Amino acid sequence: MYFMICEINFDGIVGPSHNYAGLSLGNLAATKNAGEVSYPRAAALQGLEKMRSNLGLGLAQGFLLPLPRPNTGWLAAMGADDTMDSRLVAAAWSASSMWTANAATVSPAADTADGRCHLTPANLITMPHRGMEWPDTMHQLGVAFADEAHFAIHPPVPGSFGDEGAANHMRFCAGHGAAGVEVFVYGKSGGPFPARQHEQASRAVARLHGLDPARALFVEQNPAAIAAGAFHNDVVAVANERVLFTHAEAFADQRGTYATIRAAFPELEVVEVPSSAVSLDQAIRTYLFNAQLLSLPDGEMALVVPLESWESSAVRNWLETMLAGNGPIRRVIPVDVRQSMANGGGPACLRLRVVADPATIDPRFILSETKAERMERVIAAHWPEEIHTRDIGDEALARRVVSARAALLEELDLAILT
Ligand code: SUG
């Protein structure tokens, strides 16, 4: 058999109930935009365009489908229904599974004791609207990565410890197929906003995945970054192969973190953005670090950034200076994911990285240009154009949301996810 191990980004398709209910304390974009009108169709098309752009770069691209919403089972378990407390109803309607960086933590086969790729769905317990995602996520991962010779899927870690998945996980390696050093970033509670990733959850995932303890590192996120609105590490840092692209205030002990990683992975190359060039607040407002740092087929690295960062003069200046220099990141590709950004989700939040041979994955979850066109047609025909928060809970809208998702599942031959 011919194996071609590569990184595949699985983007979350933005679901038809996408709305701005302001459910995530500590996520400044989401709370600022609470009550705004959302545009689910435009949101899903923006996400699709981003995937197509990456596909056009010659990269493997996968996707995960929106979870069933409104989540009537969850409301029933709460003894509630669509007419009750609006926060509960809004939680059941959230399209938050689009941010697949929080779907699971993934350890590629090269890093694990049994030579399989391990996935642990995140329990996401800190936020009620997110804590309900994992059962359906786990089911979907089970379909996409059903081949047990190559994949192991664990249940989430116990709900005593919050886990937010790959958004707090970085991997360093010489090439995606080579053995890596995995870095888990956790937060400590005590600040004004919740620290969503618990150290014990990270340690459990590393053990369950069978990582070599010498190649699994645990570092603390800077409490000041969480307090400033970086509710996940991927809002202030991103890694790819030998490169760490990071804000200077991402970690509790910035120099110590570099030294710890370097001790396990001497090839580490740090691209640090100093606070004098881009302040922590600017980094969080523009989501410069919530970028996809990608290895292109020609070996160069590209940074897929949200338009918001390209439009900020401070960030753009820094990026242009970086490109003019001799650093490892050779291209910057701005993308429009504004609908997701307004809920605090940039290009990196929208994708889950899986290093594997695409031939071992259920082909229904792999994107091609013709499939993208088919998906575009379904989204354009069925996704609501706009949702006002006062309409959350509306019966007719609920039916529309359910049938829109069903139409996409049918188009993709994935009715099994119903
Ligand atoms: O969990 N927003 C998400 C954004 C997740 C971003 N993911 C990463 N950084 N990887 C969150 O805060 C807002 C939904 C609302 O308020 O309705 C929301 O859930």
Image: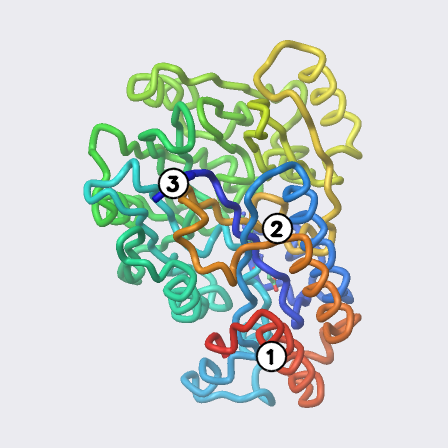
Instruction: Classify mark 3: residues with Cα within 10 Å, few (<14), some (14-19) or many (20+).
Output: few
Q: Are marks 3 and 2 in contact (CB under 8 Å)?
A: no
Left or right, 43 with respect to 300, comes to right
Residue that appears at 40% across and 28% down? 172
- The residue pinned by badge 3 equals 3
Rendered location of residue 310, percent (x, y): 76, 33
Q: Nearer the viewer, mark 1 or mark 3?
A: 3
Q: Is mark 1 within 8 Å of ligand 1?
A: no
Q: Nearer the viewer, mark 2 or mark 1?
A: 1
Which comes sooner in the sequence, label 3 or label 2?
A: 3
Amino acid under disc 2: Gly
Crowd class of label 1 (few under 14; some 14 to 19; many from 20; radius 10 Å): some
- Ligand 1 resides in the quarter of the picture at bottom right
Mark 3–mark 2 distance (CA, rounded to whole Å): 33 Å
Q: Which residue is mark 1?
A: 406
Mark 2 Cβ inside 8 Å of ligand 1: yes
Q: Residue at x 57, y 53 (%)?
A: 11
Sooner in the amino-acid sequence: mark 1 or mark 3: 3
Q: How many marks?
A: 3
Instruction: Check the image and report above or below for 235 versus 49.
Output: above
Closer to us: mark 3 or mark 2? 3
Q: How far from the left and from the top, in percent, is residue 329?
A: 60, 21
Mark 1 or mark 2, which is nearer the start of the sequence?
2
Using a 10 Å C-alpha cutoff, classify the residue at mark 2 as few (fewer than 14 neighbours), some (14 to 19) or many (20 or more).
Answer: many
Residue marked by disc 2: 345
263 up-or-down from 59: above or below? above
